[in-house]
Image (cartoon, rainbow, N blue to C red):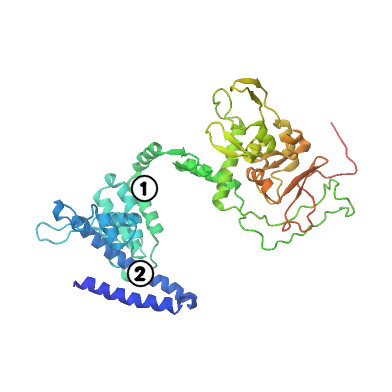
Amino acid sequence: MNSVVAHLESLDETLAVAAREGFEAEAIPDLAGREIADLLAVAGRVQRRLESLQVEATVQVRERSEGMRDERLTTTYGCSRPADLVRMLTLIDSRSANRLVRAAGFARRERSITDGGFLPARYPALREAMVSGDLGLDGFLAATEPLEASARRISDEARLEADRQLGALARGIQSDLDADSTMDEGMAGPLPTPEDLKVLSQVLVAYLDPDGAEPTDELAMRGRSFTIGAVCDGLAPVHGKLLPGVAGQLQLLIDSLMNPKVDGPENLGVHFTPSEGDDSSRSDDSPGLDDSLPDATYLDNRTRTQKRHDAIATLLNVAARAGEVSDLGGAAPTLVVSVSAEDYAAGKGWGTVVNTGDLVPMRVAAQTACAGGIQRILFDERGRIVSLGTSGRIFNSLQRRSIVRRDGGCIVPGCTVPPTWCEVHHVHEHADGGPTHTDNGVLLCWFHHRTLHLSHWQVRMNRGVPEIRGPEWWDAEQRWRPASKVRPKRSRSSTMSR
């Protein structure tokens, strides 16, 4: 057996013994912090050395899988591609196998036709760092791939200089990395992460290929995309690729709406402190404009990805309400959910999103109607339109501005969605006779508007002032509390001037 394989077989036996002893004796949970760090560091060094051997062996798989089909190594093992053979022998996934094959292409060395010796690899310094065990597969690809993307516009001399600088960084050489610097082993420092190597490689590419950004942007413009798939199990899959500027703007808008609190409060008790001049004998049904709101941690059980979805939903509602997008079919783009009058009155059944044909629960139709309006269309038994009513129950701009001034944002305590991003909710449902009046409208964000009926939050109007009663963790007394974030102060006297 070849000495390299024999050494690895012996190493495998040693590792097997070490792993077995560590797991069977439950030794790892009892290690000190420094020993845990040493364990990870040693395992990382072993992994990098093994990856260098895998890359070198994959070089041979690539080279020996060329030429006549019957002579190919892949054919001998019944595989069609080098990556398939690597995947089967190493028991890794296809992506990892393809990465090994790609790295092998950058690390391979041609033989001289004169003396049969090996010529330098395409990236000799990086290959040397990998052979020494300082550089693993991830770091090697992180350093080489940005250069390969601009390979046609970078000269061989420039590529080799970039390789020299990256190789020095990969081996922890603390130097100025200029053309005259030497790799003094005594100057070796901490090894970089793959991210560090990628950053330096991108900086070098930007210097060596200053005109590469424009072609890259042109490719990006051609590759941008966004698709919405068919609804499956109540969800529509979204796929696409956004330009960096578009992605950055969307991220900023989402971040502006994201509530930083994900987990519940550590101390669920909430203490209410009466404001100055508060009358403790006041009845529970009085307006209570001077009550203090609780200073409590907001309990929000949504995951981060769910919050991002809800933020996008809010952005879409705001954009549609702004009235600045192009008309569609002669009217502003408006979400229309169609339901039968009987189902809507009963609160049961399904609604249909008109432009897609997808079915949504009745509560979604109710939310759409609450934030928008209802238009009644009467059909006869043959489907002919016999009566057409105008859209009603929408809070107009004057009402909305007044409610925004009164509520100051989503009225659920702890919610940070600003007022301009909120929807106006009918406290007394319009379907049950509730009027479209400022005394019956409150601000709710998209998420709380959609889930209010499922949560423990309750909203009511008390003489035109919204009040809220929350779950026990928020208020053990379960009292109705003033909900507005911005509340006018009562004064004994007032003056008016013109």
Where is mark 2, residue-wise? 45
User: Which residue is farthest front?
Assistant: 381
Can see residue 117? yes
- Identify the mark at residue 108; answer none if there is no mark: none
| Residue 267 x/y as whole percent | 69, 63
Residue visible at 89% across and 51% down in the picture = 282
Identify the image quadrant of the C terminus. Answer: top right
Left or right: 324 as drawn, with respect to 30: right
Can see residue 67? no
User: Which residue is farthest left?
Assistant: 114
Amino acid on which disc 2 is placed: Arg
As drawn, 47 above or below 429: below
Where is mark 1, residue-wise? 206
Q: Earlier in the sequence, mark 2 or mark 1?
A: 2
Residue visible at 53% across and 33% down in the picture = 357
**Crowd class of label 1 (few under 14; some 14 to 19; many from 20; radius 10 Å):** some
Left or right: 310 as drawn, with respect to 191: right
Amino acid on which disc 1 is placed: Ala
**Crowd class of label 2 (few under 14; some 14 to 19; many from 20; radius 10 Å):** some
Identify the image quadrant of the N terminus. Answer: bottom left
User: Are the residues flagged by discs 2 and 1 in contact, CB closer than 8 Å?
Assistant: no
Instruction: Give the distance between the C-alpha atoms of the residues marked 2 and 1, in whole angstroms.
Output: 31 Å
Residue visible at 90% across and 41% down in the picture = 493
Label 2, secondary structure: give it: helix
As drawn, 370 above or below 79: above
Choose between 125 and 381: the one closer to the eye.
381
Left or right: 116 as drawn, with respect to 156: left
Label 1, secondary structure: give it: helix
Number of the front mark, 2 or 1:
2
